[in-house]
């Protein structure tokens, strides 16, 4: 009987690769692996940036850190050093030519005072002279209610109005006012000596729109401090 010339059929029903075919497949596999390795080596590396800590992108809640009740306060009681906020020295305060507003807590960046609007604020006021630095002379918390005045109507001394104009609703700032924008050479009898510069901790609680009294009388709006 003559020997069969047909290729053996494997048990799984597929023809087996010849020796030469196996070599071709092995070479192709090696070439593919080499190409992939080359592409991986030349692929630009991805820069992994460290995650920004939350305290740098979102201000933490500081409720309770600042004075909010009646009392006799000093500049140290504002706890600004714990936040890294500089408090001006006597020499620097006495050398001011205009107001300076140092923001401690940001406001809403939207509502800002303008002429005719009414502002509602709390403050703690200190004075600075050649002999005394940071003595408190007034505080709205001791009065039991905030100060409310209309901007642009000369209701308060110029330095206070200028500071408030530079703030926005919800802002907490330490403000410095030179003597000529405060009580000047006369001072304030029994409270502030002549030629005293002022240091004021101001919390701008609310800004009421121009003509809010008319709106209130019509019953269209209710305001917290109206």
Image (cartoon, grey):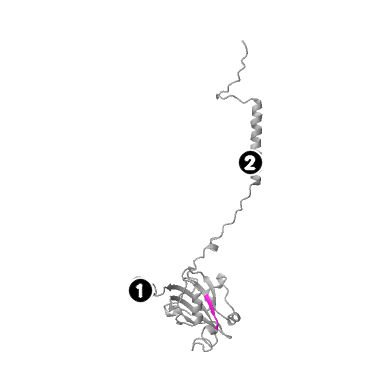
Give 39 or 74, whichever is nearer the viewer.
Answer: 39
* Label 1, label 2: how far apart the Cα atoms are: 74 Å
**Quadrant where the N terminus is found in the figure:** top right
Horizontal and vertical percent position of residue 11: 56, 23
Q: Which residue is under mark 2?
A: 36
Give the residues in magenta.
174-178
**Quadrant where the C terminus is found in the figure:** bottom left
Q: Residues within 10 Å of mark 2 (few under 14, many from 20)?
A: few
Compared with residue 191, is residue 81 higher up or lower down, i.e. above or below? Answer: above
* Secondary element type, mark 1: helix
Give 15 or 218, whichever is nearer the viewer.
Answer: 218
Q: Say if mark 1 contacts mark 2, CB within 8 Å.
A: no
The majority secondary structure of the magenta stretch comes to: strand
Compared with residue 36, is residue 126 higher up or lower down, i.e. above or below? Answer: below
* Left or right for 174, reference 211: right
Horizontal and vertical percent position of residue 67: 48, 74
Report if residue 176 is visible in the image: yes
* Secondary element type, mark 2: helix
Name the residue at 36% across, 75% down.
214
Name the residue at 65% across, 40% down.
35
Q: Which residue is under mark 1?
A: 216
Report if residue 226 is visible in the image: no
Horizontal and vertical percent position of residue 91: 61, 81
Give 221 or 78, whichever is nearer the viewer.
Answer: 221
Horizontal and vertical percent position of residue 138: 48, 82
Give 50 or 169, whichever is nearer the viewer.
Answer: 169
Q: Is residue 176 magenta?
A: yes
Q: Is residue 127 magenta?
A: no
């Amino acid at each position: 009987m003559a020997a069969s010339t047909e290729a053996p059929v494997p048990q799984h029903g597929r023809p087996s690769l010849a020796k030469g075919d196996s070599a071709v497949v092995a070479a192709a596999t090696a070439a593919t692996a080499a190409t992939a390795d080359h592409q991986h080596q030349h692929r630009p590396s991805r820069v992994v940036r460290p995650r920004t800590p939350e305290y740098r992108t979102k201000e933490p809640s500081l409720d309770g850190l600042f004075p909010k009740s009646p009392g006799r306060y000093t500049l140290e009681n504002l706890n600004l050093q714990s936040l890294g906020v500089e408090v001006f020295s006597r020499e620097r305060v006495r050398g001011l030519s205009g107001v300076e507003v140092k923001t401690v807590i940001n406001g809403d960046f939207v509502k800002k005072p303008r002429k005719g609007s009414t502002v509602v604020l709390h403050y703690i006021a200190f004075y600075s002279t050649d002999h005394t630095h940071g003595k408190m002379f007034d505080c709205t918390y001791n009065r039991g209610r905030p100060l409310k005045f209309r901007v642009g109507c000369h209701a308060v001394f110029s330095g206070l109005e200028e500071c408030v104009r530079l703030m926005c609703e919800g802002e907490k700032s330490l403000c410095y006012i030179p003597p000529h924008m405060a009580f000047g050479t006369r001072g304030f009898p029994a409270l502030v000596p002549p030629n005293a510069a002022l240091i004021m901790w101001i919390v701008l609680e609310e800004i009421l729109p121009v003509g809010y009294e008319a709106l209130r009388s019509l019953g269209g709006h209710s305001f917290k401090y109206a």
